[in-house]
Amino acid sequence: MQVLNNLPSPSDVVALYKQYNIGRMRIYDPNQELLQALRGSNIELVLDIPKGNLLQYLAASQDAANTWVQDNIKNYADVKFKYIAVGNEVEPGEAYAQSIFPSMQNIQNAINAAGLGNQIKVSTAIKTDAVQESYPPSKGYFRHDYREAYLDKVIGFLRSNGSPLLVNVCPFFGYFFDKNNIRLDYALFTAPSVVVHDNATSLDYQNLFDAIVDATYAALEKAGGESIDIVVSETGWPSSGGEADTTIDNARTYNTNLVGHVRDHGTPKKPDKLVETYLFALFDENQKGPPEYEKFWGLFDLNRQPKYQINFN
């Protein structure tokens, strides 16, 4: 959801994407004005079904899922939908956690009935704290409560449908909450040499992003999802917010290095597989928080000027 006001118009947002040659977008609910503005743009889209009561409705009714797909997908045939994220960061204890898997099934059925099953993949987006014991990466495994609530069924679904798992990967939080053990340069892609050696795999890690992704791959393997790809559906670094490490310079360093890294490299575990990655966020969200740094993840000011120079290609 967009937790801000004074947002530029949808047509201005799409124009900004074109100006900077940004080819992919994620939106957290089916904003009809923005979907209209995306018509014919050729921008690949991740469209969320936000967590909440809608998930329970979609889980209980195939007709409801059919209507949702008609209203938000089929009615926009000239929008380039790529993924539907059924819920974002749903916690195991939330009331609608049990609705994730049946909602995904019903949405997939509706997508298939529309003849779009090969074009649009259905998934859900998880937080990396669903992975436990991620140091070193080979020890990664999914928390039991996530697996029991919905993740085991989701993994089976993704495997059967050839869909990726969407994962919100945020080295900022890994570093910020564990500064005693995680170095800033390891989080910012600036470590001059190997920081972590994984004895079990003999793989070396020079940045935290790769380590988090590979820990999630290790968790997938342990849960029977070894054939499933990971798409990083959120990542970024706050440029302000009252903390020593939430600076424009660190945000520029992280996002610039990230773009170059995922463009040219896989992870140590999967060196030949580039990690499809979505930066968070386009604009600051001035109504978000606390904490204060939650407001400042944007790449652009609301006047559509970049906070710092970055090449998105």
Image (cartoon, rainbow, N blue to C red):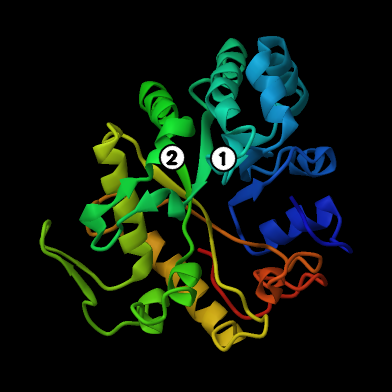
Provide residue 196's location: percent of width, then percent of height.
22, 72
* Amino acid at the residue labelled 1: Gly
Residues at marks 1 and 2 touching, judged by CB atoms closer than 8 Å: yes
Name above or below for residue 153 compared with residue 222.
Answer: above
Residue plotted at (60% across, 21% down): 107
Residue plotted at (76% across, 24% down): 75
Mark 2 falls on what kind of element? helix
Outermost residue to the right: 6
Q: Closer to the camera, 95 or 44? A: 95
Q: Which mark is residue 93?
A: 1
- 217 lies left or right of 90: left
Q: Closer to the camera, 131 or 37? A: 131
Name above or below for residue 122 compared with residue 208.
Answer: above
Q: Is residue 202 visible?
A: yes
Q: Would you identify the image quadrant in which residue 38 lies? A: top right
Provide residue 40's location: percent of width, then percent of height.
71, 38
Q: Which residue is mark 2?
A: 145
* Amino acid at the residue labelled 2: Asp
Q: Closer to the camera, 107 or 90? A: 90
Name above or below for residue 31 compared with residue 274.
Answer: above
